[in-house]
Image (spheres, helix red, strand yellow):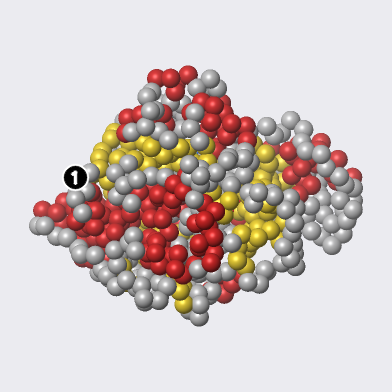
């Protein structure tokens, strides 16, 4: 089939408002949009400014009204606890409506924030949908973040209530969430009045009388008396959620997602990008704490009347590298979405894909990869073993859905390894130099997106329009700065090569080296430090810290290095995967005092490097080479 991509993109470009007005007809509105875009509202304009709607209604109730009530909405598969649960649309709606009523009993109203610190259990999705049902703004915090990170988010979001579970399960250990949450609340200035805790069988959390409440008891009580909250009418521009993501400082950015625009583009993407039909099964292996989890574990499949899968486990070791294939076969998955690092992990353990031979993947049509650059060797391996198209696609927490991809539903375009293919409708992507001047094909530059951003992309940062402007809009006037660098080839394919800021990508997790440097610098023996993302065969990048100790420090360097490793785990969390710190006598700097992190990275990666002309003292680079010998993988 000839792809309809070019025509569709051209149709969008010639009249974006007509394009999104048509896509909006796929959503059930309380009040359908009369005005599609208001260029004068918000930071750069707002989509569907006069429409009203409800996300939960579109994700659940409307499918029940149209006859899908007995179809599976959500499958929970947890090899780490040896359990499975399924929910039909009827069942999920009833759970959500009852829990939404519980939230209302606590006085939660439209616009109130609810922070969620939860593992990959169905209650996480139920909590999110319950918030959406009554207009509360959820803010899910990934379970691998430590108390301090959680506290920062609590202080920014000022939640009326917190939803949590007693624990998460990581292979070989139970992660007690409640003590981490209690510690976060002791650190935060803002003190939430109530916490609802889902007690898991693996760990019973200690509860503070008056403040902490048992999820299951509340939910059972609500259901036993038939309590159900109706869907609240929301403005399309009302926030659905806040998702904090790493910025260039230790203070995360509260990315706001609006309600109406998000529904329109998620729904559009399910068919046109992922090629999934209502009634089919779409499996995304990520976490509800990340944007991928919000968009394609919870909301996307449900908006589309498809079946989603909530997987609590890892690609390997839970119990073996065939877990994903088992799930695809068992539930008849048609499309699967994960991060390249998961495939690197599987390949490492099962290079011949022996486990794959045990399963019937006949319904499986497409693999989607995102979250980090899909390195061609991994992509080729995935293609070879799965014998389906492997589609890399590029997006960010901020964008909410895919910027550049290969639109399977419009007809697959030729795949070029190393490229996430082409911009989707909604995104006019440019490669520019520092003066915002477009660069010729094949030339590396900053990747920017012409304003306005399409529906579903962030309208602003939570209560911080100024930071939104400063972080994304000021450097390249008229454009959104992605902070990714790359180039476009003569066929219009994009190549995303890396970040222009201090963000590194560790196992598909986005982390700020600046945030880690703040933690290292807080150690009493550390005078100066630098953190870089060094190449890692499994995780893509892994943080590597350099320490310069204060004059007169005589303690064992290895001990100090161990302490800072512990400190990052304690302050940021295990997700930072910060395992190596190296002590050196001094940091390489330019004559104006800038740390030469780029060259340090090249040395650590074993890449060719040249002495920076601006370096203060060239001898330092040799010292770094010596310090790194035998220290990194
Ligand atoms: N709660 C608590 N701790 C968590 C956690 C959670 N939800 N998620 C991860 N952690 C911990 C891990 O246990 C690990 O701790 P450790 O240092 O004690 O071993 C640490 O955080 C790093 O986790 P992770 O990056 O997941 O590494 P891993 O070595 O456990 O697994 C992979 C490696 C490649 C298997 C794993 O990263 C993976 O499956 N990645 C898929 C990528 C993905 O889902 N990306 C999301 C964006 S699409
Ligand atoms: P996050 O906000 O956590 O989704 O991380 C977004 C960042 O991950 C992007 O800015 C990119 O740097 C990187 N990224 C995500 N997907 C891809 C991809 N397909 N190719 C290259 N980089 C990617």
- Position of residue 512 measured from the top left corner of the image (x, y, whole percent): 61, 53
Q: In the orientation shown, which residue stands out farthest toward the left?
A: 225
Disc 1 residue crowd, few under 14, some 14–19, many 20+, Cα 10 Å: few
Q: Which residue is mark 1?
A: 70
| Quadrant, the C terminus | top right
Give the residue at x 51% y 44%.
2
- Position of residue 558 measured from the top left corner of the image (x, y, whole percent): 69, 38
Q: In the orientation shown, which residue stands out farthest toward the bottom?
A: 40
- Position of residue 101 measured from the top left corner of the image (x, y, whole percent): 20, 62
- Residue 448 lies, with reference to residue 125, above or below; the image says below
Say whether residue 156 is visible: no
Task: Please identify the quarter of the rendering in which residue 204 is found.
Answer: top left
Counting labels gives 1
Badge 1 element: loop
Instruction: Using the image as rendered, state which of residue 260 and residue 560 is in the foreground.
Output: 260
Instruction: Using the image as rendered, state which of residue 278 and residue 602 is in the foreground.
Output: 278
Give the residue at x 74% y 39%.
604
Instruction: Using the image as rendered, state which of residue 453 and residue 82 is in the foreground.
Output: 453
Give the residue at x 32% y 62%.
27
Mark 1 residue's CB less than 8 Å from ligand 1 = no
- Position of residue 107 measured from the top left corner of the image (x, y, whole percent): 25, 69
Say whether residue 223 is visible: yes
Q: Is residue 174 left or right of residue 491?
A: left
Give the residue at x 36% y 36%.
333
Q: Is residue 558 left or right of residue 182?
A: right
Q: Is residue 606 left or right of residue 30?
A: right
């Amino acid at each position: 089939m000839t792809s309809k991509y070019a025509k569709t993109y051209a149709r969008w470009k010639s009249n974006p408002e007509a394009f999104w007005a048509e896509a909006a007809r796929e959503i059930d509105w309380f009040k359908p949009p009369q005005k599609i875009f208001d260029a004068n509202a918000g930071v750069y304009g707002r989509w569907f400014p006069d429409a009203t709607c409800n996300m939960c209604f579109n994700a659940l109730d409307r499918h029940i009204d149209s006859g899908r009530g007995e179809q599976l909405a959500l499958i929970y598969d947890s090899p780490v606890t040896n359990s499975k649960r399924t929910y039909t649309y009827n069942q999920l709606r009833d759970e959500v409506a009852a829990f939404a009523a519980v939230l209302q009993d606590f006085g939660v109203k439209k616009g109130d924030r609810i922070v969620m610190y939860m593992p990959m259990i169905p209650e996480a999705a139920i909590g999110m949908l319950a918030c959406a049902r009554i207009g509360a703004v959820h803010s899910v915090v990934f379970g691998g973040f430590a108390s301090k990170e959680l506290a920062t988010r609590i202080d920014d979001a000022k939640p009326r209530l917190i939803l949590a579970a007693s624990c998460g399960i990581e292979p070989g250990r139970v992660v007690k969430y409640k003590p981490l949450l209690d510690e976060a609340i002791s650190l935060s200035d803002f003190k939430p009045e109530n916490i609802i805790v889902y007690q898991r069988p693996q760990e019973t959390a200690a509860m503070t009388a008056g403040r902490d409440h048992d999820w299951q008891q509340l939910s059972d009580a609500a259901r036993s008396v038939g309590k159900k909250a109706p869907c609240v009418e929301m403005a399309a521009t009302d926030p659905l959620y806040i998702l904090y993501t790493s910025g260039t400082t230790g203070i995360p950015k509260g990315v706001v997602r609006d309600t109406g625009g998000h529904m329109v583009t998620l729904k559009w993407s399910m068919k046109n990008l992922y090629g999934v039909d209502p009634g089919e099964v779409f499996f995304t292996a990520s976490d509800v704490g990340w944007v991928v989890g919000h968009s394609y574990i919870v909301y996307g499949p449900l908006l589309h009347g498809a079946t989603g899968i909530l997987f609590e486990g890892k690609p390997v070791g839970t119990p073996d590298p065939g877990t994903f294939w088992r799930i695809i076969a068992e539930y008849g998955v048609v499309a699967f979405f994960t991060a390249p690092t998961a495939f690197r992990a599987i390949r490492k353990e099962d290079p011949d894909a022996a486990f794959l031979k045990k399963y019937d993947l006949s319904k499986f049509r497409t693999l989607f990869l995102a979250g980090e650059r899909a390195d061609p060797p991994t992509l080729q391996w995935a293609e070879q073993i799965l014998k389906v198209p492997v589609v890399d696609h590029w997006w960010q927490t901020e964008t909410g859905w895919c910027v550049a991809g290969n639109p399977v539903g419009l007809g697959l375009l030729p795949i070029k390894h190393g490229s996430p293919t082409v911009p989707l409708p909604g995104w006019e992507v440019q490669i520019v130099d520092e003066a915002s001047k477009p660069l010729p094909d094949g030339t590396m530059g900053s990747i920017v997106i012409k304003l306005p951003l399409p529906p579903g992309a962030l309208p602003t940062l939570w209560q911080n329009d100024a930071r939104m402007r400063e972080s994304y809009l000021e450097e390249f006037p008229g454009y959104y700065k992605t902070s990714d660098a790359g180039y476009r080839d003569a066929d219009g394919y994009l190549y995303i090569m890396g970040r222009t800021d201090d963000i590194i990508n560790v196992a598909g997790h986005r982390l700020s080296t600046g945030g880690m440097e703040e933690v290292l610098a807080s150690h009493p023996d550390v005078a100066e430090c630098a953190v870089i993302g060094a190449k890692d065969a499994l995780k893509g990048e892994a943080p590597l810290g350099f320490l310069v100790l204060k004059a007169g420090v005589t303690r064992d360097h290895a001990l100090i290095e161990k302490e800072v490793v512990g400190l990052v785990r304690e302050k940021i969390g295990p997700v930072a995967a910060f395992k190596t710190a190296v002590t050196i006598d001094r940091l390489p700097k330019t004559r104006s005092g800038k740390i030469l992190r780029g060259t340090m990275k090249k040395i650590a990666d074993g890449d060719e490097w040249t002495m920076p002309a601006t370096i203060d003292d060239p001898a330092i680079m040799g010292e770094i080479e010596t310090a790194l010998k035998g220290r990194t993988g």
